[in-house]
Amino acid sequence: MNLKRYVLANPEARLPMPDRGGRLFSPKGETVDADSAFWAARVADGELIEVQPATPVKDIPPALPVKRKGK
């Protein structure tokens, strides 16, 4: 299983999700198994665009202190 998050290339499109009882793919995006033949075909056709995960806050280095003039 290769879970990835995708959004619709066309936010107005309606895409039924067969692995979820036919519920429509959310315009806000969904996490799906990218190894599934159904989802792999949607990605290959350009219907879905992968959303890169945001960098976790714990992995962002702290900012350096700002030096003020005269101090």
Image: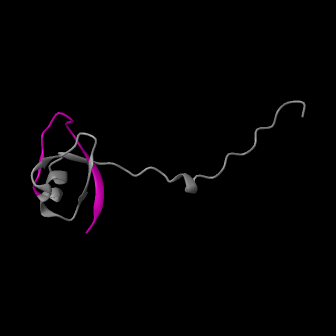
Q: Which residues are magenta?
A: 1-18
In this view, the residue farthest toward the bottom is 1
Tell me where residue 28 appears, x and y as whole percent. Answer: 28, 41
Horizontal side, residue 9 vs residue 67: left or right: left
What colour scheme was applied to this rendering of the protein? one colour
Q: Position of residue 59 (x, y in %)?
A: 56, 56
Q: Is residue 53 left or right of residue 16?
A: right
Residue 12 in the image: state x and y as whole percent: 17, 33
Which residue sits at x=28%, y=65%?
Answer: 2
Identify the residue at the far top of this view. Answer: 69
Residue 56 falls inside the magenta stretch: no
Residue at (21% x, 47% y) in the render: 48
Q: How many marks?
A: 0
Vertical side of 70 occupied by 21: above or below: below
Q: Kindly identify the residue that appears in the image at 17 percent across and 64 percent down.
A: 36
Asked if 55 appears above or below 66 in the picture, the reply is: below
Residue 10 belongs to magenta span: yes
Q: Indicate the quadrant containing the C terminus: top left, top right, bottom left or bottom right.
A: top right
Where, quadrant-wise, is the N terminus in this rendering?
bottom left
Residue 38, given in percent of the width and then of the height, sits at 12, 58
